[in-house]
C-alpha cells in the first residue's frame, strides 16, 4: 500500500498548491470520513479521499464613516479579514476558530476613542459557548490571567502571582447530555480569557483541545454581541450552535 504525505494527496485531489493544501489541514477543514486530518505531513494511503469543509463567507453587519463591523466566520484569522478591507484596521481580534462580531476602524480619531472605552472596561462583550459537563448555576470567575508564548502560540492560564485582572461571568442556558450551552460576559478581555477561565472551572469549551475540550468540528465559541459608544452589534448564532447535540 503506497503512502504519501496528506497535504500532497490533498493538493492533487483538489487541484491546488501544496501550501494551500497545508493551510486547509492546519485550519482544521479537512476530513477523512468523520475524522479530522490533524497532521499535514502525516503519511497516509495515497488512495485516500478527503472531504474539505467550506469556510462561510464574511457577512457585513454595519458600516459608517468610522467603522466596519462583520460577522467573522470560523477558521479565518482576523488578520486575513483586515486584508479584505484596505482602508480599515482591526480594533480587536478573535481567535481563528471563534466566530462572531469583529470590528475594524476607518480612522485614527475613532480608534483612539474606542480603545479608551476598552481600557476603561466600558465595552459590553457577550459570547455564546458550548462547554463540557453540566453547569447548573451561574459562575462569576474573577481570576487574573497570565499569557505566555510557547512555540509561537499564545497560552493563557489563571495565575494570582503573574496574571492581569480578568473577569468572566458565565450563565448556563441549555444542558444537552454532558454538555452545557452558556452565555459569557467578559470584562478586561485578556488573550484566551474565556477559554482559560472555563478550563479553570473544569468546564472547557467543546472543540478547544488546547484547553482540555474534546475534539469537535470547531472550537464552540461565538462572539454574539458587542456594545460600544452607544452602538450595539449582534452576530446571529451559527446554525451548529442552535442544533448542537
Image (cartoon, helix red, strand yellow):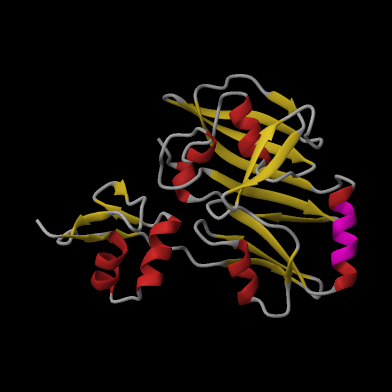
User: What residue occupies the far front of the structure in this picture?
Assistant: 151
Most foreground residue, 184 or 192: 192
User: What residue occupies the far bottom of the structure in this picture?
Assistant: 86
Q: Main secondary structure of the magenta part?
A: helix
Tell me, yes or no, whether the highlighted magenta stretch contains residue 229: no
Pick the quarter of the image with the N terminus: bottom left
Residue 116: which quarter of the image?
Answer: bottom right
Tell me, yes or no, whether the highlighted magenta stretch contains residue 114: yes
Residue 232: which quarter of the image?
Answer: bottom right
**Lateral position of residue 150 relative to residue 146, left or right:** left
Most foreground residue, 171 or 144: 144
Most foreground residue, 67 or 239: 67
Above or below: residue 226 compared with residue 90? above
For image coordinates 54% across by 31% down, the residue present is 204
Residue 170: which quarter of the image?
Answer: top right
User: What residue occupies the far left of the structure in this picture?
Assistant: 1
**Lateral position of residue 140 relative to residue 16, left or right:** right
Q: Position of residue 224 (x, y in %)?
A: 64, 48
Q: Position of residue 191 (x, y in %)?
A: 69, 46
Most foreground residue, 114 or 166: 166
Please state the extent of the stretch shown in magenta in the rendering: 111-117
Asked if residue 235 shows in the view, the reply is: no
Above or below: residue 80 compared with residue 185? below
Q: Position of residue 99 (x, y in %)?
A: 57, 53
Q: Position of residue 212 (x, y in %)?
A: 50, 32
Asked if residue 120 shows in the view, the reply is: yes
For image coordinates 24% across by 66% down, the residue present is 9
Above or below: residue 51 compared with residue 12? above
Pick the quarter of the image with the C terminus: top left
For image coordinates 36% across by 67% down, the residue present is 21
Amino acid at each position: 500500500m503506497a503512502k504519501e504525505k496528506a497535504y500532497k494527496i490533498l493538493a492533487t485531489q483538489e487541484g491546488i498548491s501544496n501550501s494551500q493544501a497545508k493551510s486547509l489541514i492546519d485550519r482544521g477543514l479537512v476530513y477523512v470520513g468523520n475524522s479530522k486530518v490533524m497532521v499535514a505531513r502525516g503519511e497516509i494511503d495515497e488512495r485516500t479521499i478527503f472531504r474539505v469543509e467550506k469556510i462561510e463567507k464574511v457577512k457585513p453587519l454595519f458600516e459608517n464613516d468610522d467603522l466596519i463591523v462583520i460577522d467573522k466566520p470560523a477558521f479565518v484569522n482576523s488578520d486575513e479579514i483586515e486584508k479584505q478591507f484596505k482602508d480599515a484596521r482591526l480594533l480587536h481580534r478573535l481567535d481563528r476558530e471563534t466566530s462572531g462580531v469583529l470590528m475594524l476602524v476607518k480612522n485614527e480619531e475613532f480608534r483612539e476613542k474606542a480603545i479608551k472605552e476598552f481600557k476603561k472596561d466600558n465595552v459590553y462583550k457577550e459570547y455564546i459557548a458550548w462547554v463540557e459537563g453540566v453547569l447548573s448555576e451561574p459562575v462569576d470567575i474573577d481570576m487574573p490571567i497570565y499569557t505566555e508564548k510557547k512555540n509561537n502560540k499564545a497560552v493563557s492560564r489563571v495565575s494570582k502571582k503573574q496574571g492581569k485582572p480578568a473577569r468572566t461571568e458565565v450563565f448556563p442556558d441549555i444542558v444537552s447530555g454532558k454538555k452545557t450551552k452558556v452565555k459569557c460576559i467578559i470584562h478586561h478581555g485578556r488573550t484566551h480569557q474565556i477559554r482559560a477561565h472555563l478550563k479553570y472551572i473544569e468546564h472547557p469549551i467543546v472543540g478547544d483541545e488546547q484547553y482540555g475540550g474534546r475534539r469537535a468540528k470547531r472550537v464552540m465559541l461565538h462572539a454574539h454581541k458587542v456594545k460600544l459608544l452607544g452602538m450595539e452589534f449582534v452576530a446571529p448564532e451559527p446554525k451548529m450552535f442552535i442544533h448542537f447535540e
